[in-house]
Amino acid sequence: MSVQTSAFRGQPVVRLALPAGDSCMVALHGAHVLSWMTADGVERLFLSPDARFDGQSAIRGGVPICWPQFNMRGPLPKHGFVRNVPWQAESQEVDGKRSTAVLSLQANEATRAIWPHAFRLRLAVTLAPHSLRIALTVDNPGSGPWSFAAALHTYLRVNDVTALRFEGLQGANRWDAVRDDRHVELAPTLAFGTEFDSVYASPARPLRLVQPSGTLEIAQSASCTETVVWNPGPVLSATLDDLPDDGWRHMLCVEAARIDESVLLAPGAQWQGWQQLTVS
């Protein structure tokens, strides 16, 4: 097993690799997971070929970290600020059949200009055979409480979003953000082809994304009380300058999130949320 630090499109990255061929790549910019390839040679994450790698912008695709705000639900920039700033590569470990990279970010002069709180974040990315686990840990080292929302905004690579089966949300409470409608999801599988943007109460069991390249199971921590499912569809995709017009066909965002009720973190307290992806 090996862990390497190198560059990708001009940005520093940490690479994880296993002997059988599984690999993962994480950018220090935003602690952004860019790639996860399983030993069968299949790339499991979608990264837009038009994504910006300028060291300042959010990267379209992979796994952006939304923190301490989700979307425009607050006064901060969209999805907060931690996906747009450099993190530190804290540690790299190999344990048995697993390889883990830990990146960290703590409050500094630049972050305090945006959000005036002391904080410490750690992202642990663990690569195992046919599996990727991403865990975000939030610490409050300050003297007062503060609240936050969080999401692991995972872009999954798919063959054709109109032809896959996505199962496991039947019976979940759903807010359809496109139609601003709340209801219980009745469909055993979700269908995609137009803009899809919904927040679900997270299910107790892993979700299943079924396509010819294999079945992907998607699990998340109980601390992530929502699952966000998003695909821009052809109309919105055509307006996004960092996504090809047909990019929507090859991606599906399935996000482990804590957004409907913010976390209030006391001084000295800690919160963790994770998502695990497993190919079966």
Image (tube, rainbow, N blue to C red):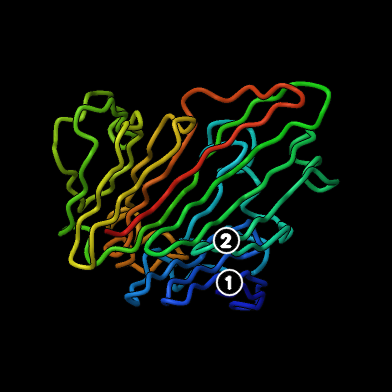
Nearer to me, 57 or 1: 1
Q: Is residue 269 left or right of residue 200?
A: right
Sequence-wise, the earlier of marks 2 and 1 is 1
Q: State the quadrant of the N terminus.
A: bottom right
Figure quadrant of residue 121 = top right
**Residue at image point 67% right, 66% down:** 55
- As shown in the figure, which amino acid type bears the numbered disc 2? Asp
Q: Residue at image x 60%, y 64%?
A: 94
Q: Secondary structure at mark 1?
A: strand
Q: Nearer the viewer, residue 241 or 102?
A: 102
Q: What residue is disc 1 on?
A: 15
Question: Distance of mark 2 from mark 1, alpha carbons?
Answer: 16 Å
**Total residue callouts:** 2
Q: Residue at x 28, y 25 (%)?
A: 173
Expressed as whole percent of the image width and height from the top left, the position of residue 192 reads: 21, 50
Side (left or right) of 205 relative to 72: left
Residue identified by numbered label 2: 95
Residue 244 in picture, x, y percent from top left? 37, 69
In the image, taking residue 239 as reference, residue 206 lies left or right, namely left
For the C terminus, which image quadrant? bottom left
Q: Residue at x 49, y 46 (%)?
A: 152
Q: Residues within 10 Å of mark 2 (few under 14, many from 20)?
A: few
111 is higher (above) or lower (below) than 182: below
In front of the other: 172 or 80: 172
Q: Mark 2–mark 1 contact, CB under 8 Å?
A: no
Amino acid type, mark 1: Arg
Residue 132 at x, y = what percent? 45, 57
Q: Is residue 80 placed above or below 4 in the rendered structure?
A: above
Q: Secondary structure at mark 2?
A: strand
